[in-house]
Amino acid sequence: MRPFLPEERLGSLLALLGHWGEVYGPVTTGDGVTAFRPVSDPGQLRLEYRRTLIPPKRFLLPPRETILTYSPDAGYQPLDTAQPALVLFGLHPCDLQGIAYLDRVFLEGVVDTSYRRNRQALTIIGLSCEPDEFCFCGAAGADLPAGCDLFLQRTPAGFFVTAGTMKGEEICDRSAQLFTLRQPAGTTPWHHPLADAICRGCAAGETFPDNPLWDRFAERCLGCGACSACCPTCYCYDVLEQGGLDGQAAERLREWDNCLFKSHGEVAGGVNFRRSRRERLQYRFLHKYYGFGALRGVISCVGCGRCRAVCPVEIDLAALFEGEDHDRQ
Ligand code: SF4
Ligand code: SF4
């Protein structure tokens, strides 16, 4: 028997979660896109959503943030203001894996203090999902994906609840009066065959150097960078100094960069490591599937399907593993 939250008590759980911070969940915005926004009423939530346009990495790595301040007296100083506490409600297993991946990058070894400050402000509530034609993750169907404090397995009548951290256990304790006990029917982990093909390809060190798909993709890629901006694990950034109008105070800013942009590979002396679109596409692909894998034993694509869904010319790099360009145009 497991704790079960009946659907009609979801509003009570949202109210209770307010104790841990302002609650953000998946909603449809006025622009018609799905995004995480403040919610107070379960009627605002789009629990059946597949993916948000911008992944939850924006709460950990905002598109632009101040990471240091400068004054002539104190020099460079880290920000000492705490981030407001937020509860992210309804993250799918792919996005939870994405956060677990970013945690490895920014919290293991040399700790990124800005990321840690943002991460510590979050309470994360996961939600099971139904994959669509763009998804190819290997984690859907898991009872408790990594990276969340609490995970809700959705059923037609409500949610099986599993705590993943001590904070999750505390949330369960405080909301125990909302739960009943039910026998789970047993879920079968959903594993996309493409996720298996990618694992096999990566294990074999397959880098597709001569695949003609590279040329076909490079011919039609617009270099817009949407595939990277919407990726939950892409974290390339640029660092800028911004002086104040008084000529004294200044800030050091971090903002998203994008390896699909030509400027990303520029270095001093007019040299560019990746002048051609083919090189830039290959760079992104090889970093996703091989660069991180060799270092940490996991690939950095979580199969969320965003890059497949948003590319305006329907480039699907995962097609390299399938051996054909689906060419959905
Ligand atoms: S590479 Fe594409 S499918 Fe993989 S995590 Fe990034 S956006 Fe999702
Ligand atoms: S979204 Fe498509 S067109 Fe835009 S940079 Fe990525 S692969 Fe190229």
Image: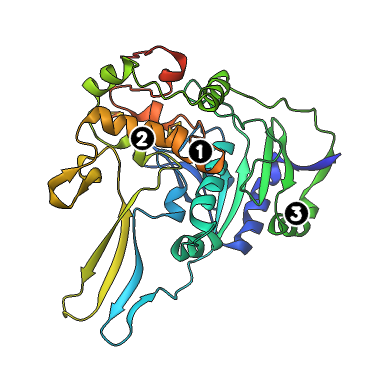
In the image, residue 74 above or below residue 258: below
Badge 1 marks a residue whose secondary structure is: helix
Q: CA distance from mark 1 to mark 3?
A: 38 Å
Q: Quadrant of ligand 1?
A: top left
- Residue drawn at (56%, 47%) of the image: 100
In contact (CB < 8 Å): disc 2 and disc 1: no
Quarter holding the C terminus is top left
Which of marks 3 and 1 precedes in the sequence? 3
Q: Amino acid at mark 2?
A: Arg
Instruction: Find the residue positioned furthest to the bottom.
Output: 73
Q: Position of residue 212 (x, y in %)?
A: 31, 14
Residue at mark 3: 172
Q: Is residue 82 left or right of residue 1?
A: left
In the image, residue 241 above or below residue 103: below
Q: Is residue 39 visible?
A: no
Mark 2 vs mark 1: in front: 1
Mark on residue 284?
A: 2
Q: CA distance from mark 3 to mark 2?
A: 41 Å
Q: Amino acid at mark 1?
A: Ala
Residue nearest the viewer, comparing 92 with 217:
217
Mark on residue 294?
A: 1
Residue nearest the viewer, comparing 288 with 147:
288
Q: Is residue 190 visible?
A: yes
Badge 3 marks a residue whose secondary structure is: helix
- Residue drawn at (47%, 66%) of the image: 113
Q: Is residue 281 left or right of residue 38?
A: left
Which of marks 1 and 2 precedes in the sequence? 2
- Residue drawn at (46%, 32%) of the image: 289
Residue nearest the viewer, comparing 35 with 203:
203
- Residue drawn at (80%, 32%) of the image: 184
Mark 1 vs mark 3: in front: 1
Mark 3 vs mark 2: in front: 2
